[in-house]
Amino acid sequence: MNYSAIQLAIFIERTNRFIVHCRLVETGEVVVTHVKNTGRSKELLLANTLVAVNYQPSLKRKTAYDLVAVKKGEMWVNLDSQIPNPLAAEGILNGTIDLPGLSGNVTYLKREYTFEHSKFDIYFETDQQEKGFVEVKGMTLENHRIGAFPDAPTLRGLKHVEELRLAQKRGYHCYVLFVVQFPIINVATIHRKMQPALYDAIKLAVADGVQVLAYNCEVDQETISIKAAVPFDLKQKFIDPNQ
């Protein structure tokens, strides 16, 4: 996935969930920028941090720029919450992302599929008449090469995990897929202290046969692509860098 009009900037401040102010490196102009992620990202959006903003002017927009990536140490972290779903769909179809436990090959894929009271990110079918769902979550929180989700409580995510359990019991092949939006990671886990209920729901889902996967990404200021599978360990301890 490539962004068309990236400019480097220096982060100044975040005024609310959706808006930050940045200073363009090339011109020194301070620009109002839309944040394409409603997570907290406190450990990333620090004063004077280098960021990548995408210039997308339109009469229908209040801002001309989107903040899409942040430099953290030696790596870029992509913050675009709209990017994990197309990356996942593309990765499943081209074989970069493997869905364990299937006998056949995925021959049909549809994004945003309604099941019961949830709209799952991906519905698929295989050439062996298998059917299933993949719920995709972007992961941006990291500390000591451990990635964790979520960085803020998510009622929507909790609901989806609970309904994946129901779908699994009805014979679907169900997966939670974490797209880790940065490259340097040893293991992914659930941020249990942030949302104990989600941790418990994932634990029950795994016991019912739902599989949890994690794939990291190659990221720079202009591009992001699926890299490889990384271990997911529900028991992995995680220290929140913001506490």
Image: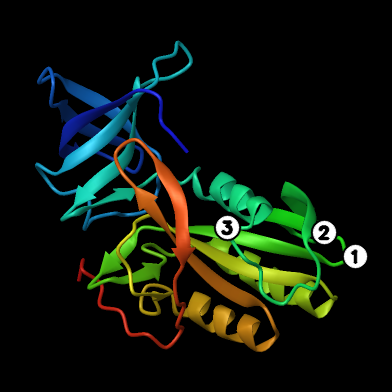
Residue pictured at 63% horizontal, 50% vertical: 89
The mark nearer the N terminus, 1 or 3, is 3
* Viewport quadrant of the C terminus: bottom left
- Viewed as shown, does residue 15 lie left or right of 84? left
Cβ atoms at labels 2 and 1 below 8 Å apart:
yes
The alpha-carbon separation of the residues under discs 2 and 1 comes to 6 Å
- Amino acid type shown at disc 1: Gln
Q: Which mark is residue 125?
A: 2
Horizontal and vertical percent position of residue 200: 53, 83
Q: Is residue 14 visible?
A: no
Q: Examine the image and state in which quarter residue 236 appears.
A: bottom left
Q: Which residue is mark 1?
A: 129
- Residue 100 vs 154, above or below: the answer is below
Cβ atoms at labels 3 and 2 below 8 Å apart:
no
Q: Which residue is mark 3?
A: 96
Nearer the camera: disc 3 or disc 2: 3
The mark nearer the N terminus, 3 or 2, is 3
Horizontal and vertical percent position of residue 141: 32, 62
User: Which type of secondary structure does the marked residue at label 2 adopt?
Assistant: strand
User: Which type of secondary structure does the marked residue at label 3 adopt?
Assistant: loop
Q: Which mark is residue 65?
A: none
- Viewed as shown, does residue 134 lie left or right of 108? left
Nearer the camera: disc 1 or disc 3: 3
Q: Residues within 10 Å of mark 1 (few under 14, many from 20)?
A: few
